[in-house]
């Protein structure tokens, strides 16, 4: 499935934090808006994503903020880091864009920022990109992921029409991390708990197969995404254009290391 990339260069969309909500012990919702929201251009994808831009503390950046100019004029160590987040919802009338952040204490970059965020704080982002939206005429939908994919999966089941059939598998730490999923469709949701040793791949493979007219969305930790890629394409023979797959992260690697690994894999594939 072709992907519309997030806008990485050029003028960033500058928002401000309007409010913060704690959804679960490890999920924080940031609702942003302000005058800069008029520069945001939504797309039709339920996995629409943005690149959240984190400035390096103590560095003065040219205004208006422009990532292309920053990359051209500043040394690499002063270039802001970026993290990818799904747009959980966008409401033009209300003037609100919603992002959900997985947090694990002081670990990482974006999670701690979300924990510290206060109304009025700046939120810089580029995008959106995206690649997936559920087809209303699909025979059924298979959606599988972990906490990192939960916002996209929740947005996707919300978009399903009445009468659509879907089977959803979500791997989270424990029962406290479960969230209600709102939908008009007929959706069977299986919550799996990492703390109990649940195996997402095994759960998907052991579930009844509902037929070949399937549209699948499998996103999250790269290890299970790779295993389910093999299951869908090799064992089930699902057409590649009926599947959206993405390893959002890899266990044991930070975002920069994971992006470098993915880039190296792409280079190796291109040269093969």
Image (spheres, grey):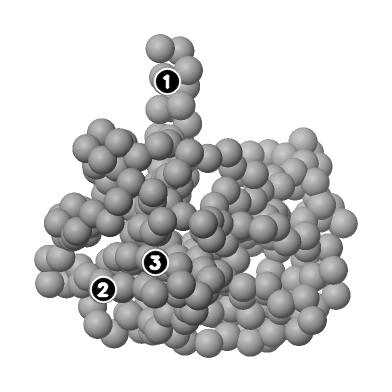
Residue 165 - label: 3
Residue at 37 percent across and 73 percent down: it is 187
Dot 3 alpha-carbon crowd within 10 angstroms: few under 14, some 14 to 19, many 20 or more? many
Question: What residue is shown with label 1?
Answer: 269
Q: Quarter of the image containing the C terminus?
A: top left
Residue most toward the left?
197
Label 1 or label 3, whichever comes before in sequence order: 3
Image location of residue 23, percent across then percent down: 44, 85
Residue at 53 percent across and 79 percent down: it is 29
Horizontally, is 184 left or right of 233 in the view? right
Whole-number angstrom distance, CA of label 2 to CA of label 1 = 35 Å
Q: Write down the quadrant of residue 193 in the picture.
A: bottom left
Residue 253 - label: none
Dot 3 falls on a residue whose secondary structure is strand
Depth check, mark 3 against mark 2: the one in front is 3
Is residue 47 shown above or below 123?
above
Q: Write down the quadrant of residue 164 in the picture.
A: bottom left
Is residue 24 shown above or below 154?
below
Whole-number angstrom distance, CA of label 3 to CA of label 2 = 17 Å
Dot 2 alpha-carbon crowd within 10 angstroms: few under 14, some 14 to 19, many 20 or more? many
Image location of residue 250, percent across then percent down: 33, 48
Residue most toward the top?
272
Q: Write down the quadrant of residue 188 in the picture.
A: bottom left
Question: What residue is shown with label 2?
Answer: 191
Res. 112 visible in picture: no
């Amino acid at each position: 499935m072709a992907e519309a990339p997030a806008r990485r260069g050029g003028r960033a969309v500058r928002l401000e934090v309007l409010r913060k909500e704690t959804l679960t012990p490890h999920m924080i919702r940031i609702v942003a808006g302000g005058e800069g929201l008029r520069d945001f251009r939504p797309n039709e994808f339920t996995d629409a994503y943005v690149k959240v831009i984190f400035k390096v503390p103590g560095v003065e950046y040219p205004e208006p903020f422009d990532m292309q100019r920053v990359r051209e004029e500043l040394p690499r160590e002063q270039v802001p880091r970026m993290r990818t987040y799904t747009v959980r919802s966008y409401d033009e009338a209300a003037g609100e864009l919603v992002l959900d952040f997985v947090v694990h204490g002081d670990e990482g970059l974006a999670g701690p920022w979300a924990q510290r965020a206060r109304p009025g704080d700046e939120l810089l982002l580029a995008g959106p990109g995206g690649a997936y939206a559920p087809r209303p005429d699909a025979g059924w939908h298979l959606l599988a992921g972990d906490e990192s994919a939960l916002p996209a999966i929740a947005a996707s089941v919300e978009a399903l029409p009445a009468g659509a059939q879907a089977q959803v598998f979500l791997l989270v730490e424990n029962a406290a991390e479960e969230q209600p999923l709102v939908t008009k469709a007929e959706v069977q949701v299986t919550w799996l708990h990492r703390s109990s040793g649940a195996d997402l791949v095994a759960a998907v493979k052991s579930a009844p197969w509902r037929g070949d007219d399937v549209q699948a969305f499998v996103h999250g930790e790269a290890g299970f995404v790779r295993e389910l890629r093999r299951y869908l394409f090799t064992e089930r023979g699902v057409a590649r254009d009926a599947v959206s797959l993405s390893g959002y992260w890899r266990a044991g690697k930070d975002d920069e290391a994971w992006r470098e690994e993915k880039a190296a894999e792409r280079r190796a594939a291109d040269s093969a």
